[in-house]
Amino acid sequence: MVHFNQPTQRLAVGTAEGVVLLYDLRTATKWRILQGHEAAVTALAFAPAGDTLASFSASEASLRWWAAGSSGLFSFLGLQGSCLGVTRVDCALPDAPGARVKIEWASPQSVGITCDNEALGFFTRPP
C-alpha cells in the first residue's frame, strides 16, 4: 500500500511485515520508519495537511495514528516515528483476496474505512 501527500512531498509505503516507511521526496531520503503493526498494512492515508498518517491492518483489526509532520528542531536526529494512538476496528472485514480497502479522512481527527466502496466504519483518533 502507498499514499502520497502533495503538500509535504512525502510518500508512505506500508509493508507486508507491518512496517510503514515514510520517504521525503524533496530530499530523496527515507524520512521515518513507523513500527507497531504486527501484520501486513492493508491501507494508509495522510491527513490533508500531511501532519498525521493513519495506517490500517485488517489482519490485526487495528488502526494506528502516527505523527507525520516535523516535530521540533531535533526531529531530524532519529528515524523512528511516533505512534499517537491505536484504535481497534470492530467491524466485519471481508476475507476476499484482492478486496480494496481505503482510508479517507473525514476531519482532522477522524477517518472512514471502506472496502470495495462499502463503509466499514468511522473512527476518531484517541486523545
Image (cartoon, helix red, strand yellow):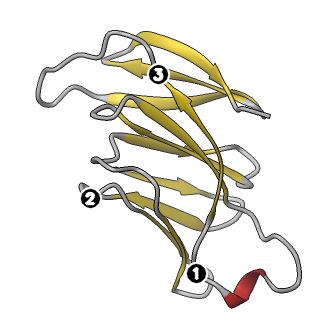
Task: Tell me which residue sits at (62%, 81%) in the image.
Answer: 26
Q: Report the Cα–Cα distance between label 3 and label 1.
A: 28 Å
Any mark on residue 79, and which? 1
SS class of the residue under badge 3?
loop
Query: Where residue 73 sits in the image (x, y, percent)?
Result: 88, 84
Query: For the residue marked with disc 3, what is the amino acid?
Result: Val
Residue density around tag 3, few if under 14, some if 14–19, many if 20 or more, within 10 Å = some
Q: Residue at x 28, y 47 (%)?
A: 39
The label number, if any, that marks residue 6 in the structure image: none
Q: Are marks 2 and 3 in contact (CB under 8 Å)?
A: no
Q: Which residue has dot 2 on it?
A: 17
Is the residue 68 above or below the residue 87 in the image?
below
Which label belongs to residue 89?
Answer: 3
Q: Is residue 10 above or below residue 120?
A: below
First of labels 3, 1 by sequence position: 1
Estimate the x, y position of residue 5 in percent, counting from the top left.
60, 56
| Residue type (three-letter) at the residue carrying disc 2 | Glu
Q: Earlier in the sequence, mark 2 or mark 3?
A: 2
Look at 51% across and 12% down and name the residue there. Answer: 121
